[in-house]
Amino acid sequence: NAGVTQTPKFQVLKTGQSMTLQCAQDMNHEYMSWYRQDPGMGLRLIHYSVGAGITDQGEVPNGYNVSRSTTEDFPLRLLSAAPSQTSVYFCASSEGDVPSTIYFGEGSWLTVV
Amino acid sequence: EDKVVQSPLSLVVHEGDTVTLNCSYEVTNFRSLLWYKQEKKAPTFLFMLTSSGIEKKSGRLSSILDKKELFSILNITATQTGDSAVYLCAVDVGRFTGNQFYFGTGTSLTVIP
């Protein structure tokens, strides 16, 4: 039961470096999204996609890029890491066009020094 | 602007107590409300509510939605130390062709033996 798989689980970056968080789902879900979770802030939406080739910004998109070339994959790119991007990142997916639960990956703990 | 507010922010109770967690929302397009439990890792699904007045129940946990007053409650009876977690409320605003979830900041529950 793979569900939503995201990698890496832990990463330390230096300020200015770039990196990509990978996310894949095997449930044929149309909707995929990236959240970041900071203490006292809850889960905040970074970017989302309603299908292959379609992406849009969420609440906190600055400093991040996404693409959706296939239904399965939705990578999140940090263009030039900043200490403010130290956070826990969750990839998630859901069915899309019906009320459905949202399924989360295990999370990626990112520290920018 | 869509908004999901949870209260209280944190709660400390003794084992055996009953707790009520609140989630209120103001959104432009309501599709469903979801409750999740998070214990230092990815959130796990508890309930999805779409209709007013219909209680969802799972063991000692139950939840109900009031679409007129725009809130939901999550009840936990006979609390146990294993119930210690952050409880998240999310509303699916279902924009465009897919799901779009907005999360509250969560209620941190600590159950003392």
Image: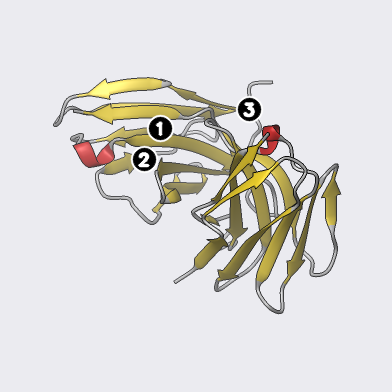
Q: Which residue is mark 3?
A: A3
Q: Give x and y (percent) for residue A7.
A: 44, 22
Q: Are marks 2 and 3 on the same chain?
A: yes
Q: Residues within 10 Å of mark 1 (few under 14, many from 20)?
A: some
> How far is the residue under mark 1 from the one under mark 3?
16 Å
Vertical comparison of A67 with B4: above or below: above
Residue linked to disc 1: A75
SS at mark 3 in the image: loop
Residue A48 drawn at (x, y percent): 46, 48
Q: Position of residue A13 (x, y in %)?
A: 23, 24
Residue found at x 58% / y 63%: B93
Nearer to me, B30 or B84: B84
Judge if badges 1 and 3 mark residues of a common chain: yes
Q: Write down the quadrant of residue A82 in the picture.
A: top left
Q: Are marks 2 and 3 in contact (CB under 8 Å)?
A: no
Q: Which label belongs to residue A66?
A: 2
Residues B103 and A47: in front is: B103
